[in-house]
Amino acid sequence: MHTSTGWLLSDRVILTTYCDIITKEHIAIEQETVLHILNGVSHPTHLVIEVSAGRQFSSDLASLKTIRQYANPILRHANLGWVIVVDPTPHPVFKMIGYTLTQVARKQLYICGSRDHALEFLYSKDDSLNSATT
């Protein structure tokens, strides 16, 4: 399986994982799943995108227009909280694009090196996660 999306913390944090070469087809499938999840909740829900296993991006993602096409519906969703990208060595161009797109959508992006660090960060920023998991 190249990609997967599901709950990292039930009803609070979505995890999308990309493996191997990341293509726009993979992103389109996961985008649909994430939007379905966000449409089913009535509170801010955070998104963790783990790309550490998928270190290569296909050439069809080289266009900012293409990236924006897939990112905008999620970034503009009212129920989206923080966006966390897990990547131990983020590519500088994708890092810049990520920060730009999230700022335009008035969302917050954090990039870190591990899933544990992502959860630690979210717990420090969202007090409701502590009460949701206890």
Image (cartoon, rainbow, N blue to C red):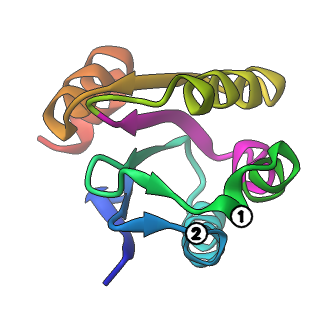
- Residue at the spot x=45%, y=22% of the render? 110
Q: Is residue 58 above or below residue 82?
A: below
Q: Is residue 35 above or below residue 67?
A: below
Name the residue tied to disc 1: 60
28 sits to left or right of 52: right
Which SS class for mark 1?
Answer: helix
Quarter of the picture containing the N terminus is bottom left
Q: Position of residue 30 (x, y in %)?
A: 54, 71
Q: Quadrant of residue 58?
A: bottom right
Q: Position of residue 129 (x, y in %)?
A: 29, 34
Depth check: 111 or 131 in front? 111
Q: Position of residue 84 (x, y in %)?
A: 43, 34
Is there CB contact under 8 Å for labels 2 and 1?
yes
Task: Name the kind of residue labelled 1 in the image.
Answer: Asp
Magenta-drawn stretch contains 14: no
71 sits to left or right of 53: right
Q: Quadrant of residue 98?
A: top right
Highlighted magenta segment, given as a residue range = 71-87
Name the residue tied to disc 2: 23
Q: In the rendered structure, which disc, 2 or 1, sits on the residue that comes first in sequence?
A: 2
Depth check: 37 or 130 in front? 37
Q: Is residue 34 visible?
A: yes
